[in-house]
Amino acid sequence: MLRATSNWNRDAGSLKLTGGPMQNIAIAFTVTADPTSKARYVSELIAIRGDDQGHEIGRLHLQLGDGGPESIQHSLAAQVSELNTFIGAAPIFVRDGAMWKRFLRGRSPEQVKQLLGQTTDVTQWSRRNYPRQRNDLASLLKRLKLTIDGSLAGLERDAVALARIAPMLRQPAAPTVVLVSSGMQTPPSVPPLRTDAPHPRPGFRERLRLAWCVLRGDA
């Protein structure tokens, strides 16, 4: 039987639901394939509201059965209001932007445009900033020198990892870097151009040309 439940820490989450400038929404979801149509849909979702240090403030958990894409979408329609209130205007961080966009289908074009405008695809961000390197959440946590509770597993682990990563993606842009072999390194410093350096001594042909100009009275 299809069921949709939510588990929201309202006491923690209701204090700051306006999407303040340093709050983030990390959303992880499970994607299921319908055995008949092979269509893929979101069957479970965990959204975590985090502060600027990646600490959890509130959580929303949507858990659905295996009723198929149509039933899933119908059930989620009843949860849209709560999910929208939980997200507010805060930036959204997901691992699979394409599936998140598909999940939003059925809403008004204005809602979809607004939510996509708030969304950062962490996998795409990782590919742009760390090309040719692993972009799974565990590798990204290690690269950013972040840690999470090792006892976490599955969807909850992914949601917590995204919540920890989110503040790092909102920091001001780092200095320009250049790609060197497989890693990113800062470019070597270039010494300033000296204006007081002596001019190089002209070559033999140039000296000969100057002497000829003197003899002819051109200099």
Image: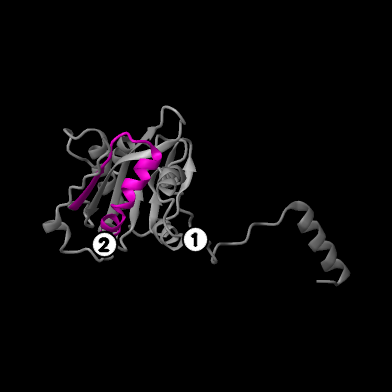
Instruction: Judge by depth and name the residue closer to the eye, 95 or 141.
Output: 95
Q: Which residues are magenta?
A: 58-85
The amino acid marked with disc number 2 is Met
Q: Mark on residue 117? A: none
Q: Mark on residue 192? A: 1
* Residue at 41% in and 31% down: 34
Q: Position of residue 91 (x, y in %)?
A: 33, 58
- Height in image: 198 above or below 187? below
Q: With 86 as the anchor, is 96 left or right in this view?
A: right
Sequence-earlier tag: 2 or 1: 2
- Height in image: 164 above or below 115? above
Count the marks: how many?
A: 2
Mark nearer the viewer, 2 or 1: 2
What colour scheme does the image use? Answer: one colour
Q: Is residue 145 visible?
A: no
Residue situated furthest right in the rendering: 216
Q: Are marks 2 and 1 in contact (CB under 8 Å)?
A: no
Q: Position of residue 90 (x, y in %)?
A: 30, 61
* Residue at 29% in and 52% down: 78
SS category of the residue bearing label 1: loop
* Residue at 22% in and 63% down: 17
- Height in image: 54 above or below 139? below
Quadrant of the rendered structure where residue 157 is?
top left
Alpha carbon separation for disc pair 2 and 1: 39 Å
Q: Position of residue 123 (x, y in %)?
A: 40, 43
Instruction: Judge by depth and name the residue closer to the eye, 5 or 196.
Output: 5
Q: Quadrant of the N terminus?
A: top left
Residue topped by disc 2: 22
The amino acid marked with disc number 1 is Pro
* Residue at 27% in and 38% down: 2
Q: Is residue 78 magenta?
A: yes
Q: With 172 as the anchor, is 13 left or right in this view?
A: left
